[in-house]
Amino acid sequence: MIEHELRQLVQRLTQPGVEWPPQVYQQARWLVLDTLGCAIAGGRSPTVRAWLEGQHLRADPFATADPAPAGPSPGAAMAFAMAACWDEACEGHARAHGRPGVAALAAIWPWVHRLNWGQLLNALVLGYEVGARMGALLRIAPGMHVDGNWPSLGSAAAAASALQLHAEQTLTAIHIAACQLPTSLYRPIQTGDTARNTYLGHAAMLGLMSAQAAAAGISAPANAIENHLQVVYQKTAPLGWEGSNDFEILSGYFKPYAAVRHVHYGAHAALNLRPQFDLQALDRIDLWVYREALTYCGVRQPHTPLQAQFSLSFGVAAMLRWGRLDSTVYASPAFEDDGVHQIEKKVTIHVDDDWTQKQWRRARLKLSLVDGRVLENTCQAVLGDTDMPWSEADLKQKFITNCQGSLSPARSLGLAEHVLHAPAQAAIFP
């Protein structure tokens, strides 16, 4: 059943001359713009810069120059994925419970100088559609993190398309990756260690290698994904994993804030309440969320930026203190600000069982003040949800903001226009 559905999907998306609805291409371009902007911002991190230096990519961080005779460097895929997720401001997909786009785009990235826009978008959409469905299928076990697991399968499909492999070779590439899917731990988030930021890069590199192996004639069992599900999880495929949408990419979201999506709802509720009181009057904070939000983002009193990105309480505190939740709140001096940490200690988190049962993503925030007043706000949607779609202008502004300190405003705007509107036959970079 799994292999039948996967085969139908790959064959549908790799038909010669296939044309998809305009909104699919638009969403794919938006994904490229947003992910590239996040990578440019993350590339300013000293750790990412050190990786680029070690991989001899410092002068060409996004690997757009002609590669060495040996071919594209897997190190470029790691650099792109690691930088893109560094500030936790990149894309996601709720049904997949992860990010199908970052690893797929990173696996393509070493070939961007060889591809035109039409080829890149076709490869990205294929990788995204495979990855999103694999995320719904391979639900991770407690204590695991998604980024180093099923995204490898989408990245294998994307890399296969970038290599112009046919449908059977693409399926083989996916199966090669499925034979060796890694198990990545949630533990670094609890400890605040940045090992987690390498997971999507690992997924991209595994996908890239699997596509190259399929191109060379390496074979793999056609039931590898089903076998992985049985061996690793001891279970069968969940009902409905294949979805009902022709294009899962249309259900993907972009983040307005630099934090895990679960943090957004409480942070947005905090932003709505912020103008109504003085922080000195704050006595107690109560936050209601759905169970999954607390499971993945229950970190308290974070000591590192990574911990803070997965902290419901820090997201609320930072938004109340600064009125923003972007990469600057994780850097000095904002991150060391005692006021933020004192506010965070006042937060008590509750689980709303009804929201959990109905699989609703939302948050309710109640602020109790020393004068007896109580302020409340419920956030049912944030920018990027179905009820609050992004506009092109919103995404452009996020991209330009992410590029500050790396590119001039004129260069950022010109690059954004090219990514969004370049003809299908045009080169990736102007």
Image (cartoon, helix red, strand yellow):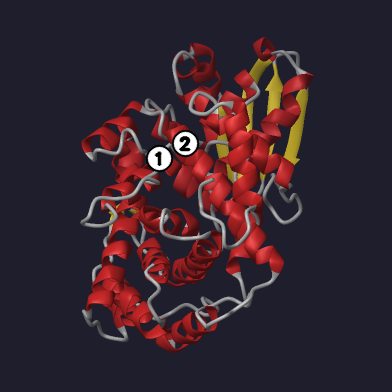
- The span from disc 1 to disc 2 (Cα, nearest Å) is 7 Å
Toward which corner of the image does residue 215 lie, by quadrant? bottom left
Toward which corner of the image does residue 150 lie, by quadrant? bottom left
- Total numbered labels placed on residues in the image: 2
Q: Position of residue 28 (x, y in %)?
A: 59, 59
State whether residue 151 appears in this view. yes
Of the image marks 1 and 2, the number of the one nearer the N terminus? 2
Mark 2 secondary-structure assignment:
helix
The residue at which mark 1 appears reads as: 83
Left or right side of 357 for 222: left
Q: In which quadrant will I find the N terminus? A: bottom left
Q: Residue at x 37, y 27 (%)?
A: 304
Q: Residues within 10 Å of mark 1 (few under 14, many from 20)?
A: many
The disc labelled 1 sits on which kind of residue? Ala
Per the rendering, the mark at residue 40 is 2
Q: Position of residue 411 (x, y in %)?
A: 58, 32
Q: Residue at x 75, y 30 (%)?
A: 272
Mark 1 secondary-structure assignment:
helix
Q: Position of residue 134 (x, y in %)?
A: 44, 70
The disc labelled 2 sits on which kind of residue? Ile
